[in-house]
């Protein structure tokens, strides 16, 4: 699910970047640090949409030649966080006999064979896939599936999820092979 | 409700059902158990729906009941099925595997200690419990048997190819830089320059044919002591279309024990896996599955690593022979073992073990030879425990400590021993231990003339005996 929130962060800036471009430097450093990171609470930061406010810079006590000044910055950003029970569309990246791996943006989702309906069987080959007995529905690399999230886990830079397609209205949305 | 009338068992009274049960299930059981179903039936006569459902289920059960003993179970099963339908609960989750610490079936957090084997070569973060791995292996075994395939685990360095760091190239090897094959289309060449890895790689002659033929009989795995990027890059050179190995590329980052290789992350049953490696000690617990191959030293740095004083193939500007090389020999052995496994002997395939078949193939090599060793083993130790004795027995030869009429070969390191002189007198073969080692690596009995002890011919049998220490 996507969220649009205001978050706060303390940015440290070296005095060499002070001057006319102070605010620009601050914002570009913020973008570089925060975009693409993720946290357990907020999920994945997709993009920063705006700066709400920049507080007064705090100079640390005691002087040293490499002193960095701290600026508290409030910024608006777009967050992405998967939840348990959420339905997502994902892109299949790897299919093997244990299940398949899919990606929804930065999120890696694994759907195990145990959570794939029994009607779909694994077919090995140079393009391994799961297919129904009549061949009408096929899950293979590079097809889109709709799945339900069963569990999520957030790492420093990645979010892992476990999903299922063993429910109504789930599984393949659009098969590139059939589209032709 | 018309639905109820569809069921042939339906009747307004439970007595008919009891009678039906009796006839269907055969009066082999005792009377007490027979009364059970009837009583239950009477209690549930309240709602037609539940009655009908019970009868439906009972019908299903009657169809599946094979022996008379199951009558008692009918009542209890009926009840439990009711309960399970009502609460729609399943068995507690067994947590067969985890993906980043989450159970792959229920999504709950699973503690670190309970989780099983890491399969990082498939994907980062995925682990499977040992029971699940066994289950997957069994399913795999059935699938492979249908396709008539076994598993083959291949080592990379010195087995299928030889790599060297560019820094270690000797001056006389510099000419190689000008004859490397393009990386755009690797299917034709065998010498590649990998600038971005500071390496040069030479594929062993015959390797492409080997892989093509082996993939028809085996599911192929790569298991190397190199790191993951190296393993993936080599797989791209050997298998540009990804048809032989797929995702089955295990590097040292994916192994469970450092500096050791094991079949625990290979998804095949141990009795259906063969291993091809140049280093025996890398597989401490799977020596029976292992086929040891002669090391491929193309680059000078490779020879130096193993402390050989010989010149490498690149320095000699030559290469291993394609049709006669080590890979061709091993391919023949693999074909032989594979055909023995899938031979239609009437025996159930699940009882066949590829390890014993490999031993069988090996025992053909020196079949019929009786070998006596002379001054090869230190006198204090037991001769039967010496590795060379064991190797000779593994190759099918009978070993003995004393000479007699049936002896065919005397293996010696030194001339002038009584056994050697006896052998010359009796016109038996005298060879040095290289003859046994060669048979082991080349899977064929070698001509004894190539392994003779030179001085034996010069000395002859007339000499006086020196100090004889056998």
Image (cartoon, coloured by chain):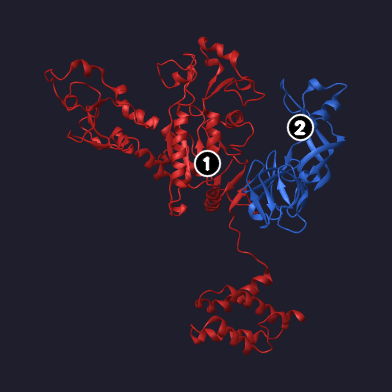
Camera-side residue of B438 and B82: B438
Callout 1: chain: B
Seen in the picture, residue A126 relative to B30 is either above or below; the reply is above
Q: Is residue B361 left or right of residue B320?
A: left
Residue A18, given in percent of the width and then of the height, sits at 83, 22
Residue B188, given in percent of the width and then of the height, sits at 61, 24
Residue B169, given in percent of the width and then of the height, sits at 53, 14
Residue A87, given in percent of the width and then of the height, sits at 77, 52
Q: Residues within 10 Å of mark 1 (few under 14, many from 20)?
A: some
Q: Is residue B452 left or right of residue B308?
A: left
Identify the residue at horizontal 46%, vertical 52% (top origin): B349
Which residue position holds label 1?
B217
Chain A colour? Answer: blue
Quadrant showing the N terminus of chain B: bottom right
Camera-side residue of B123 and B289: B289
Q: Is residue B166 left or right of residue B305?
A: right
Say what secondary structure mark 2 lies in.
Answer: helix
Q: Residue furthest top?
A: B171
Identify the residue at horizontal 61%, vertical 84% (top origin): B40
Chain red in the figure, letter = B
Both marks 2 and 1 on one chain: no
Seen in the picture, residue B323 relative to B132 is either above or below; the reply is above
């Amino acid at each position: 699910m996507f969220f649009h929130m205001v978050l706060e962060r303390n940015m440290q800036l070296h005095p060499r970047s002070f001057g006319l471009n102070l605010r620009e430097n601050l914002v570009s450093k913020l973008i570089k640090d925060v975009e693409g990171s993720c946290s357990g609470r907020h999920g994945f930061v997709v993009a920063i949409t705006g700066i709400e406010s920049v507080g007064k810079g705090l100079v640390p006590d005691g002087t040293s030649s490499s002193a960095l000044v701290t600026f508290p910055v409030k910024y608006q950003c777009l967050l992405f966080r998967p939840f348990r029970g959420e339905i997502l569309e994902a892109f299949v990246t790897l299919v093997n006999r244990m299940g398949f791996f899919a990606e929804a943006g930065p999120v890696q989702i694994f759907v195990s064979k145990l959570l794939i309906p029994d009607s779909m069987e694994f077919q090995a080959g140079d393009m391994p896939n799961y297919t129904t007995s009549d061949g009408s529905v096929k899950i293979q690399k590079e097809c889109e599936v709709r799945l339900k999230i069963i569990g999520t886990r957030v790492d420093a830079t990645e979010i892992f999820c476990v999903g299922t397609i063993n429910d109504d209205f789930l599984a393949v949305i659009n098969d590139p092979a059939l589209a032709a | 409700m018309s639905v109820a009338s569809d069921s042939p068992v339906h009747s307004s009274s439970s007595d008919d059902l009891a009678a039906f049960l009796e006839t269907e299930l055969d009066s082999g059981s005792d009377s007490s158990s027979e009364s059970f179903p009837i009583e239950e039936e009477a209690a549930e006569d309240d709602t037609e729906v539940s009655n009908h459902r019970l009868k439906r289920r009972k019908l299903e059960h009657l169809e599946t009941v094979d022996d008379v003993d199951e009558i008692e179970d009918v009542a209890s099963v009926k009840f439990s099925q009711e309960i399970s339908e009502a609460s729609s609960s399943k068995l507690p989750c067994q947590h067969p595997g985890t993906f980043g610490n989450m159970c792959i079936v229920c999504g709950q957090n699973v503690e670190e200690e309970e989780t099983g084997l890491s399969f990082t070569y498939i994907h980062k973060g995925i682990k499977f419990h040992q029971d699940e791995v066994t289950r997957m292996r069994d399913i795999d075994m059935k699938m492979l048997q249908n396709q008539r395939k076994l598993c083959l685990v291949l080592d990379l360095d010195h087995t299928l190819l030889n790599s060297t760091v560019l820094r270690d190239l000797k001056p006389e090897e510099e000419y190689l830089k000008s004859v490397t094959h393009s990386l755009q289309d690797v299917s034709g060449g065998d010498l590649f320059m990998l600038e971005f890895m500071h390496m040069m790689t030479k594929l062993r002659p015959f390797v492409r044919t080997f892989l093509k033929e082996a993939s028809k009989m085996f599911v192929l795995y790569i298991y190397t002591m190199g790191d993951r990027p190296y393993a993936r890059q080599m797989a791209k050179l050997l298998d540009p279309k990804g048809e032989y190995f797929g995702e089955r590329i295990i590097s040292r980052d994916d192994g469970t024990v450092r500096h050791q290789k094991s079949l625990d992350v290979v998804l095949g049953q141990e009795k259906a896996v063969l291993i091809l490696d140049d280093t025996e000690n890398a597989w401490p617990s799977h020596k029976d599955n292992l086929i040891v191959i002669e090391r491929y030293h193309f680059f000078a740095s490779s020879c130096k690593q193993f402390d050989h004083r010989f010149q490498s193939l690149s320095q000699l500007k030559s290469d291993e022979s394609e049709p006669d090389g080590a890979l061709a020999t091993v391919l023949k052995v693999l074909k032989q073992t594979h055909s023995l496994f899938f031979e239609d002997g009437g025996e159930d395939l699940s009882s066949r073990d590829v390890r014993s078949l490999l031993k069988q193939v090996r025992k053909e090599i020196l079949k019929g030879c009786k070998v006596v060793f002379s001054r090869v083993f230190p006198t204090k130790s037991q001769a039967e425990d010496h590795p060379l004795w064991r190797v000779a027995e593994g190759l099918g030869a009978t070993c003995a400590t004393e000479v007699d009429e049936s002896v065919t070969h005397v293996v010696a390191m030194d001339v002038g021993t009584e056994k050697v002189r006896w052998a010359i007198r009796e016109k038996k073969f005298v060879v040095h231990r290289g003859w046994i080692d060669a048979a082991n690596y080349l899977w064929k009995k070698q001509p004894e003339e190539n392994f003779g002890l030179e001085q034996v011919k010069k000395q002859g049998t007339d000499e006086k005996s020196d100090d004889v220490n056998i």
